[in-house]
Image: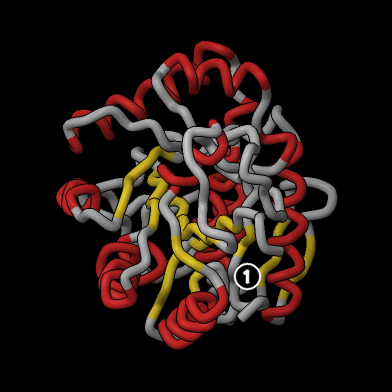
Amino acid sequence: MNGKMRIFLFHGVVREHRHMVRNYTRKHLSIDQFVTFMRETLQLHQPVTMDECLKACLGDSDLPPSPFAVTFDDGFENNASIVAPILTDLGVPATFYVSTGFIGTDLRSWTDEIESALEDETVVDIRGVGQGVDGHYESAKEKQALMEEIRQKVKTDPAIDPYEYASNLVKAIGPRQIEFCGELDAKMTWDQVRDLDKEPLFTVGGHGHTHRILSHLGHDELVDEIRTSVNLLERVVGHPVIHHSYPEGMPNCYSPEVIRVLRQFGVRCCPTAIEGFNEFRSDPFELKRILVDGSKV
């Protein structure tokens, strides 16, 4: 695939996997998996920045024959404490797209909130939530299958507010001890965001404010979501923020209106989460990425 841009999509890296339901998709790789993947990739391809990818898209410069870019979504603290030192040692640049509403908090995304409630080893009986969700769940496999059902339902229905849905579902699951896991739950602080952006190898971009699907929002909500994200980041890093990535990032998660609003606030490049490679002259708002999780390393 020489002559194509590869943009890898990661979320996080952890020291160990120790949960049944939490991180079952392995979006957080182990350190060994991440280091092995990066070293093997460096043997075949040449690292580039998202700035360089943008210039290639616009026809302002060329890229090496077999380029790859590294991106991380969401803003997990492990990006700063685990990922950044590894990439620095390897000399690999990266762009970190952060959901600004999570930064400096211990808030979970709606999917992480539900996974946390299902992690308990006890049997779960859910009633009153709706078809496809109500039922009796005992094994880790059953709970993981439930999470897949929930993900599909919420991500494809614009009428569902994901955080309201998660709150109602957690209540239906019933009282239980929900563990806070630092490596999976902690988000970066604003100081860490600022420090990452100061490093020559690294770039910080937006990923929405609340991580809601942008195309599901009304116009005023969409403007507020993007304005808040961009303004907060620019206030912290002290310069224009031109990079963003779409939360969820599938074809139904963005639209021409979403792109217009992103452009309105100075964003010039916003990759998707659609799987694939890119031509050097691709639309910078339609760039594909290759998700790297535990199933691929």
Image side of residue 286 versus residue 112, left or right:
right
Task: In the rendered view, tell whether residue 2 sits above or below residue 237.
Answer: below
Q: Which of the 4 quarters of the picture holds residue 32? A: bottom left
Residue drawn at x 45%, y 40% as measured from the top left? 207
Q: Position of residue 144 (x, y in %)?
A: 70, 70
Image side of residue 9 versus residue 274, left or right:
left
Type of amino acid at the residue the image marks with label 1:
Thr
Total numbered labels: 1
Front position in the image: 246 or 199: 199
Q: What is the residue that sits farthest to the right in this orientation?
A: 131
**Which residue in the protein does label 1 denote?**
25
Q: Is residue 8 visible?
A: no
Task: In the rendered view, tell whether residue 218 sits above or below residue 275.
Answer: above
Image side of residue 179 versus residue 287, left or right:
left
Q: Position of residue 37 (x, y in %)?
A: 52, 80
Residue drawn at x 67%, y 33% as measured from the top left? 160
Rendered-image quadrant of the N terminus: bottom right
Image side of residue 5 versus residue 244, left or right:
right
Identify the secondary structure beneath mark 1: loop
Task: In the rendered view, tell whether residue 12 sits above or below residue 261.
Answer: below
Q: Residues within 10 Å of mark 1 (few under 14, many from 20)?
A: few
Q: Position of residue 44 (x, y in %)?
A: 56, 76
Q: Is residue 75 visible?
A: yes
Rendered-image quadrant of the C terminus: bottom right
Residue drawn at x 60%, y 77% as measured from the top left? 294
Residue drawn at x 35%, y 45% as measured from the top left? 102
Front position in the image: 68 or 215: 68
Q: Which of the 4 quarters of the picture holds residue 91? A: bottom left
